[in-house]
Amino acid sequence: MRLKPHEVNAIKTAAVDAFGKDVVVRLFGSRVHDHLRGGDIDLLVEVDDDSTAARADGRFLAKLFEHIDEQRVDIVHAVRGCEPTPIVAIALRDGIVL
């Protein structure tokens, strides 16, 4: 995984602050693979309600960028109990829980 420990901690802390204590965050995409270079941070955020999650994204990013350098972060929501979209299915299968 190509995230530093302080970046993982910042993501987890910001996610709890923005989405609540029951949030589960997974890293997926190129940053999962140690042999690759570059790439944005792709995160799957598991939530109970997608309508409130979209509004929480801004809070999450603001809190995150207080602790790490600004960079491209893509957030995908997985709503618990709903059929996963193809990208969510890939992230659930290949992602690493932070």
Image (cartoon, helix red, strand yellow):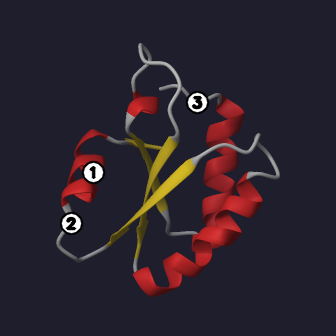
- The answer to whether 16 is drawn above or below residue 87 in the figure is below
Asked if residue 53 lies left or right of residue 72, the reply is left
State the separation of the CA atoms marked 1 and 3.
18 Å
Asked if residue 63 lies left or right of residue 86, the reply is right
Q: Amino acid at mark 1?
A: Leu
**Circle number at residue 3:** 3
SS of the residue at dot 2?
Answer: loop
| Contact check, label 1 and label 2, Cβ < 8 Å | yes
Q: Residue at x 50, y 77 (%)?
A: 53
State the separation of the CA atoms marked 1 and 2.
9 Å
State which tag comes first along the sequence, 3 or 2: 3
Residue 58 occupies which quadrant of the picture?
bottom right
Query: Residue 69: image x %, image y %?
Result: 76, 40
- The answer to whether 96 is drawn above or below residue 17 in the figure is above
**Circle number at residue 42:** none
Q: Is residue 21 visible?
A: yes
Q: Amino acid at mark 3?
A: Leu
Q: Residue at x 52, y 84 (%)?
A: 52
**Which residue position holds label 1?**
92
Q: Dot 3, how many residues are within 10 Å of its Cα: few (below 14), some (14-19), or many (20+)?
A: few
Q: Residue at x 18, y 57 (%)?
A: 86
State which tag comes first along the sequence, 1 or 2: 2
SS of the residue at dot 3?
Answer: loop
State which tag comes first along the sequence, 1 or 3: 3
Query: Residue 10: image x %, image y %?
Result: 70, 47
State the separation of the CA atoms marked 3 and 2.
26 Å
Query: Residue 49: image x %, image y %?
Result: 41, 83
Q: Dot 1, how many residues are within 10 Å of its Cα: few (below 14), some (14-19), or many (20+)?
A: some
Q: Amino acid at mark 2?
A: Pro
**Circle number at residue 84:** 2
- The answer to whether 75 is drawn above or below residue 94 in the figure is below
